[in-house]
Image: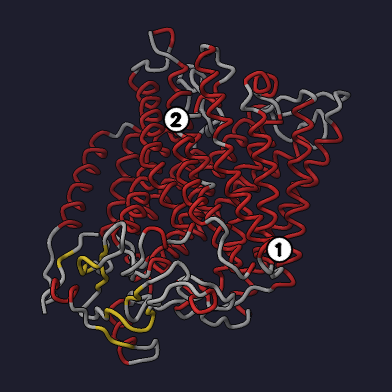
Amino acid sequence: MTTTELIRQPEVVAAGYDSPTARRLEKIWKTTPGLLGWLTSVDHKEIGKRYLVTAFAFLVIGGIEALIMRLQLARPEQHLLSADQYNHLFTMHGLTMIFLYALPVLSGFSNFLFPLLLGSRDMAFPRLNAFSYWVYLAAGIFLYLALMHDRTPDAGWFNYTPYTLRKYDPGQGMDIYALGMVLLGVSTTVGSVNFVVTLLQMKAPGMSINRIPVIIWGTLTASVGNLFAVPAVSLAFFMLWTDRNFDTHFFDAAHGGHPLLWQHLFWMFGHPWVYAIVLPAMGIVSDGLPIFCRRPLVGYTLVSMSTVLTMFIGFGVWVHHMFATGLPPQSLSFFGAASIVIVIPSAVAVFAWIATIFTGRPVYTTAFLFLAGFIFLFTLGGVSGFMTAAVPVDWQLTDTYFVVAHLHYVLLGINFFPVIAGIYIWFPKFTGKMMNERLGKWNFWVMFIGFNLGFFPMHWLGLIGMPRRVYTYPAGMGWDLPNMITSIGSFLFAFGILLFFINVFVSARRGARAGRNPWDGSSLEWSTPSPPPSFNFVVIPSIATRHPLWEERIGEGEAGSKLEEGLLLDRGKQTVSTTALNGEPQAILKMPEDSWSPLLMTLALSALFVGMLYHWWWFTLAAVLASVAVTIAWLWPRASLGQTAGEHHG
């Protein structure tokens, strides 16, 4: 039977996860055991878990850096750190939390869950998926190479020029930051392409665009935003590197450059990036609340549209960060208005979540507590951001601790609490074990109280005039007590995170066994065993509604979804491709086997950037040639092994 015939007249079979068919599929899809398999695996579930573990490792590093800073600021006129040491620590903390934790941890969820939520057996480009992880890991290691040099980056994560030009900031630290961010941009870009194509092409038959979970909408929107935003900051960092190494003077005013150009390029990326690390987290909330409220999300269509609209407007508010730079009043008026308007789609989501809770029957699990806590933090962080949308207020609050408070409520509270909720929700699917609910509730309350105790007083510090980015302060300014409270709260919050890690490790070893659907969820991932097999689904499901596991309960859909019968696709590593809008089957894809290419390409790129850093030009040329060779090997056509599907170069 040809591929076209198979699509039009599919081989419809019924097979369970304990059937001979499932065992045959497991042999086809299973990664080779041992170190070899670990290095070459393209299994989206393994890659997702690696993202999560690596991102949490960077969270620990960034958290330790933050605690050292809070020890320095706990009392006035402390000398635990010098001003120079504080600047280095402050910068490494910012770039670690914002670039190496916040988005990669969400990529971990999306990598693991995307095919399971969409009813597919893998991502659209499995090898590109592995490549994105290896490059992310390489970029993180590259950025921390600065610890081996005389200077780490010390100009803040925002890296403003002209302070970062070589005559003001000598040493290798700033060059490492610039090149490391370009390398990290490669990972973010290829990962974003993979998420977009996976959604458009790899959905289960019948899964039209209005039936996908909200977390898919959040990741799609963030990925599209990254495809436009990341090139801006990659270009800015590359221009900075050439300024520092080849005297190109893009940002040097003394030679005709423009320092403010850096801020435009950086914040064209920076503000959409905020939504890129928030919208997928909001998707976790939108899909998690219905599970524990025992009802579908109120206003699904409005929430999905507001997700897209938030990113769209987000590209028009980057000057929100530049109100104090002396721009023309007309510019300030436009961007101030845009900064106020962007509150509206966020408010739509908040009201939808509250309505879902009040019209449902909430089950007060640990995950639900984190989701509800997020709504509180989201509202508070949104209000403080809304205040700075007014230009006169922003002028008063710019470069004070009020902005630090808002930043942490937005980037840490609004990202971290949904992430922890997501771990509690999908930990059974990750590991096959349940997390301890009693320890989980202690975990929530310690974190929630510690977070607000640590960061809410910063609002007051800003209002009474404490500037940000200072390493110490004099006594008698009224800043002593709020800083001490903030430091105590920060350590309490860190203790809550420690309780979370204890729960994860203990539950992974001794947690109760989880069934397929321990939370009684409605989406497709809960129809698979916990943890899912390497092939995800024995047969490709056919979807008729937005809640395939709740159809009988909520009376949704007449035809009914078919989860245990459908396309078998067992002639090798195969999955189905469907149309973007309606989810109609259009092709059968042969997915690539495990491969060395992603790791080898990462090593070649890493060598390229190392050569650029140290000006080893022959080494750089060799790395370029190696990259070309690996690319050719990656894309080289392979034998079809007698399969009817076309080769898929993922």
Q: Is residue 27 left or right of residue 512?
A: left
Quarter holding residue 232: top left
Residue toward you, 201 or 40: 201
> Which residue bears the numbered disc 2?
268
Relative to 369, is 173 above or below?
A: above
Residue drawn at (37%, 48%), measured in percent from left and top?
187
- Quadrant location of the N terminus? bottom left
Quarter holding residue 545: bottom left
Q: Position of residue 298 (x, y in %)?
A: 57, 58
Decide which of tag 2 and tag 1 comes sooner along the chain.
2
- Name the disc covering residue 383, or none: none
Residue drawn at (70%, 20%), measured in percent from left and top?
396
Q: Is residue 603 left or right of residue 524?
A: left
Label 2 vs label 1, nearer the camera? 2
Residue toward you, 649 or 300: 300
Amino acid under disc 1: Leu
**Number of numbered markers:** 2
Amino acid under disc 2: Met
Residue drawn at (11%, 75%), measured in percent from left and top?
2
